[in-house]
Image (cartoon, rainbow, N blue to C red):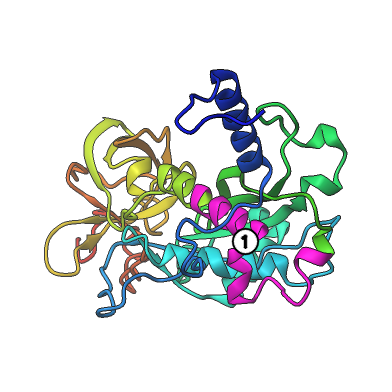
Amino acid sequence: MRRAPGSIVPSTALTSVGVWTLLATAAGCARPTNPWVYAEPPAVSVVAEARPMESGRTVIAVARFTNPEMPQLDWPDVGPEMSSALRRALYNETDFEIRIAPEIEESASDPSFLVKPSQLSSPVEVDFVVIGKVTDFHHTAALPKEASRWGLILRRHEAVVAIEWKVVDVRARRVIATDHTYGSAKTSGKKSIQELYAGLDVSAYLFWNTPLGRAGHEAIDKTIQRMREVLPSRVAGEPRIVHVLGPRKVSVQGGWKSGLADGQEYFIVLPGDAQGRPLYDADTGRPLIARISDVRKGTAVAWLVGKPPEDVNLSGALLSRQPAAPPEDLARRNAVAGIEGGT
């Protein structure tokens, strides 16, 4: 039966059309936000001029991620390419300075790195290293249905990329943050994953226009968001003692937001001339060390390793990562004063 022009379509028909439109959208293959241009990979957005380096900014390196253990695609460089994309995206984070340091990246990826003794006298070129692996690089249509989540009515067909990552404090040789972040993007489920990605690999620019590319982009964005929550924007190079709490216990200005962490060790320097005056153990003549503990957001406690010199007020003293060589005759004089140049 034909309807006369201008007749009203029943509301049930409109409802049916709306439902099927939603279903088609949910089941259809997602595409870039702007379908007229290619989706961009994570990359540097500063194009006018290079951003100047700022002293004191947290320095981060990203180690090569390992590949998924059960890949759906025979791509050997999924992990390394994802770590490279994370590194590029981090260049946009003005709170951090990104550095490529293959030696320390490889060392921090070795579990034995966490149990080696710290050597504060050796200069370290980065503060934190991000290590990890790509655990998921999948289309859920090729997995058991229980592995996918529900849509409006049916289970969704999605691409899922997940990264398990850790942040290693290089100087303290400890893991300070760990998380497992993921991203997802819709797929049609009509083509096999091998057909959909034929002729591409993860290093291609056009990869980021695919469902796995969009899911990877989201996973990287979430990873950076979590890193901003747990990492200090500036590492405290010279925290300051503000109160003396006991014979060998002091309160330090600056907490985890300034880069302090349990177990870090600093040399104590009294403010004075341009170089400051390093303090020495009154018994051994060795540099006096403050070991950080009980770290909070803006404060921390430090315990003195050694006997502080007598008649020296530690309030206002700086904590330095660089040791100072004691005077040649300090040991002979038994460090009575405990101060360089003292008697």
Q: From the viewer's side, name the closer residue of 182 and 270.
A: 182
In reply to whether residue 216 is colored magenta, the answer given is yes
Q: Is residue 165 above or below residue 54?
A: above
Q: Which part of the image, by quadrant, shows the N terminus?
A: top right
Looking at the image, residue 261 sits to the left or right of residue 53; the answer is right
Q: Is residue 187 visible?
A: yes
The quadrant where residue 199 appears: bottom right
The quadrant where residue 302 appears: top left
Residue shown at 78%/57% (left/top)? 68
Q: Position of residue 86 (x, y in %)?
A: 53, 63
Q: Which residue occupies the extreme bottom position in the image? A: 49
Q: From the viewer's side, name the closer residue of 295 and 74.
A: 74
Q: Position of residue 169 (x, y in %)?
A: 51, 54
Q: Which residues are magenta?
A: 195-222
Q: From the viewer's side, name the closer residue of 110 and 324.
A: 110
Q: Is residue 12 above or below residue 220?
A: above
Residue shown at 61%/53% (left/top)? 215
The quadrant where residue 210 appears: bottom right
| SS at badge 1 | helix
Mark 1 Cα within 10 Å, few/some/many (few <14, many 20+)? many
Looking at the image, residue 141 sits to the left or right of residue 289; the answer is right
Q: Position of residue 39 (x, y in %)?
A: 50, 66
Q: Amino acid at mark 1?
A: Gly
Q: Which part of the image, by quadrant, shows the C terminus?
A: bottom left
Q: Which residue is mark 1?
A: 213
Q: Position of residue 132 (x, y in %)?
A: 66, 56
Residue shown at 84%/58% (left/top)? 192
In reply to whether residue 156 is colored magenta, the answer given is no
Residue shown at 82%/66% (left/top)? 195
Mostly what secondary structure, the magenta segment?
A: helix
Q: Please give the count of numbered marks on the rendered protein.
A: 1
